[in-house]
Image (cartoon, rainbow, N blue to C red):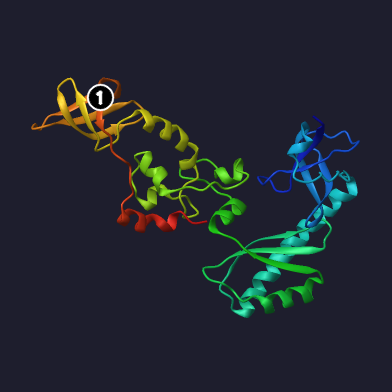
Amino acid sequence: MAMVKYIGVRFKKVGKIYYFAPGELDIHCGDKVIVETVRGVECGEVVLADREMEESKLNSPLKTVIRLATKKDFEMIEKNKKKEKEAFAICEEKIRKHGLKMDLVDVECTFDNNKLLFYFTAENRVDFRELVKDLASVFRTRIELRQIGVRDEAKMLGGLGICGQPFCCCRFMGEFQPVSVKMAKEQSLSLNPTKLSGTCGRLMCCLKFESEAYQDLLKTTPKTGAYVKTAEGKGVVTDVNLLTGTLKVKIDKSDNLLTVNKKDVEVIKDSVIRVDKNEMRALKQLEGK
């Protein structure tokens, strides 16, 4: 099977990784390279080097790296950063002038200086056609306004989570994973919006990280409401600690609560974890992007 050499390149600090062919260049992790993308010529950082994959796994041929970044390229990057700061201030002024209900989050100038991208958030759709014309007349280049969600805004701006650590999306998450209310329910967490949501106002991404482990434990642990047989008799499971494997069982025709290990019970009829309609209605908005 023919093998193809490739490298992985990121264009943002914690962004998606794109693959390119190194060609004859000696490229290492941490190097800055100039490559051609769908947005034009861009400069990115190498995060994967000296990798190989089967040619049959490629959806399309890899584009070859144009060159390693030079001193002139780094000067261009610094020049673009200054232009981005200038563009941010001017765009905010123009937004106020046009009376648009939108919040500017970030400005990005492509490496080849052919386009300025303005990222913003807004509660509703915004007619920004006049704003685009205004910005194009100032910068004499292609202008693109892109509406983003609150999660993308948090990723761009950064900050600290309730754990005291920088946001996961800013540290290592290349792409967002879907997070659901059911994941919180499976982890026996209080369905309280203030406790489940991150700074962005959506369900915390870390709920996804532990979800598979909890799902595996649920396969071998009776759920709350399950009818089980114990050494003291039959009863209903009223509380479950998935991590320790301990259960609290209310024995039939008795007020006694028995604490047992899941290994010491026989499941007669298991229960199902469900999120009721009222809980779902209250928390549904937390699942969005």
Q: Is residue 134 above or below residue 34?
A: below
Residue tagged 1: 266
Left or right? Give the position of 281 relative to 213. left
Residue 125, quarter of the rendered image: bottom right
Amino acid type of disc 1? Glu
Left or right? Give the position of 157 relative to 76. left
Where is the N terminus found, in terms of image quarters?
Answer: top right
Q: Is residue 53 above or below residue 60?
A: above
Left or right? Give the position of 188 relative to 123. left
Residue 215, quarter of the rendered image: top left
- Which residue is drawn at the image coordinates 60% and 61% (left, top)? 148
Residue 188 in the image, given as x and y percentages of width and height: 34, 39
Residue 260 in the image, given as x and y percentages of width and height: 24, 23
Callout 1: SS: strand
Question: How busy is the neighbourhood of tag 1: few (under 14 within 10 Å), some, or many (20 plus)?
Answer: some
241 or 113, which lies in front? Answer: 241
- Which residue is drawn at the image coordinates 24% and 38% (left, top)? 225
Residue 138 in the image, given as x and y percentages of width and height: 78, 74
190 or 154, which lies in front? Answer: 190
Residue 163 in the image, given as x and y percentages of width and height: 47, 40
Q: What is the count of numbered marks? A: 1
Residue 38, quarter of the rendered image: bottom right
